[in-house]
Image (cartoon, rainbow, N blue to C red):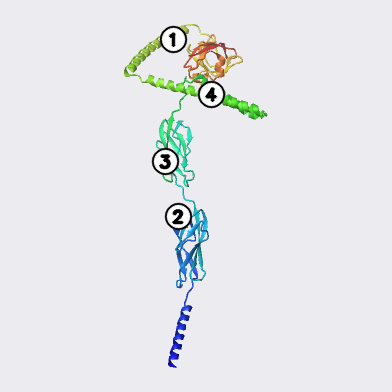
Amino acid sequence: MKKIIIILSAIWLGCGICYAGVGDTIKVTKITLLNTALSLEKDKTIEIKVKKIEPDSASNKDVTWISSEITKATVNNTGKVTAKAVGTTTITATAKDGSGIKATCTVTVTAAAVLVESVTIDDTVRLTASNTKILTETVSPPGAINKKVTWRSTQETVATVKDGKVTAISEGTAEIIVTTNDGKKTDTCIVIVSPIVSLLDDNKISAPDSILILQDNIRTLKDENAELKANQNPIPAFVSYILAGLLLVLIVFLVIILKKHKKELAKQKENAEEALNISDEEEKKKKDELEKLNKGLNDKIKDLEFENKNLRADLNSKPAQTPTTFVSAPVSNSVSLSKSLYADAINEQNGLFNRVTESPNEDTVFELKLNNAADKTAKFTIYERACPRVLKNNDFAAGCEMQKITSSPSRLDVEQGTVELQDNGKWKITAKAKVKFV
């Protein structure tokens, strides 16, 4: 009996211990991951970590891992994720204690980054001062993610650059360098800046007359085009095509001629520079010749002053005459024979100068040399400072006969014309000036 009681007591004690063990199991109530969303490049890996499992006294804190889209990314039993293809998948961590508690992390798989391998721009650019040129960079490969670049110039006094726009400053050579932000790849463009060649220098005509004529033709074409638009007359399509074709041919012709004259000007400039490179001996010789010439001029001036003095004495010895008043210019008999008047325009209908003044101005075209104050006559010629612009002045053409025009005139030879003062105070041309282009 005693043995039976001992056995029963042992059985009861064991059952009590087992029951107590089952009653003490603590389930997981919450799982928190370190990240809830991640971005991962294709073929890269990352490990998702568990930040916290609640409660801290949970009996079993182990978790299982699973991916919702294994074609996009897979996950192993430690939470290591491997990106497979571009897309999105959800990685789920589930408590192993049977509580059903879960936590998720969204993984976005992106394409592998394409790095920049090279960048290219134009090798050489030629500009004249103040002109601009936009350089366009080509970044390779085309699928590169970061195509941003920076620009710089090695000679900013020659040319500057901003966002690929090159501005020519002065004559010289500069390197424009482009650099990629990704990989620091570079390429260089050589910018050659030429000076602006002036067609007119020192108030003398040095530009070919044909260039001025071509410029006038271009302006005329623009004016005619504007007038056609204003009239808004419907033109058949085929006529428009013909006119457009003719205009294109004319433009090409003008470009060819301008290029030809540009070469001629460059050659003239080169010859002039060579002529300036004279030796010291030649320079001294020319200086001596100039001194002799200056001495001769001084002697001539003295002779003229002497003659002028005698002439004034003769005039003063004669009886006084009634002064003649010129309506168009306040001069009288007391005016010196070398007195000059200045005219700015000719009326083609009646051959009269529209305005005559004692002083030249910006509109002056002709210079009048008075014979004397009594006979109301004068000789006229081209005003020296107006030579650079008389070729384009209709008033000049009306008052002169142009005998010869060469392809590249270097000066004007003018045979003086004559004018006579009318009763209305206007000077009328009695003989046109004859102009020869040499």
Can I make out residue 328 in this image? no
Q: How many residues crowd mark 3 within 10 Å: few (<14), some (14–19), many (20+)?
A: some
For mark 2, give the secondary structure.
loop
Label 2 sits on residue: 44
Q: Residue at x 50, y 23 (%)?
A: 258
Disc 4 and disc 3 in contact, CB within 8 angstroms: no
Q: Which residue is mark 3?
A: 186
Mark closest to the chain's N terminus, 1 or 4: 4
Q: Which residue is mark 4?
A: 254
Q: CA distance from mark 1 to mark 2?
A: 107 Å
Which residue in the structure is indicated by mark 1? 308
| Residue 250 in view, yes or no | yes
Q: Nearer the viewer, mark 1 or mark 2?
A: 2
Residue type, numbered disc 2: Lys
- In the rendered structure, which disc, 3 or 1, sits on the residue that comes first in sequence? 3
Q: Spatial distance from mark 3 to mark 2, Cα to Cα?
A: 30 Å
Decide: few, some or many residues near mark 4? Use Cα within 10 Å; few <14, some 14-19, many ≥20: some
Type of amino acid under label 3:
Thr
Which residue extends farthest left?
281
State which tag comes first along the sequence, 4 or 3.
3
Residue 116 drawn at (x, y percent): 44, 45
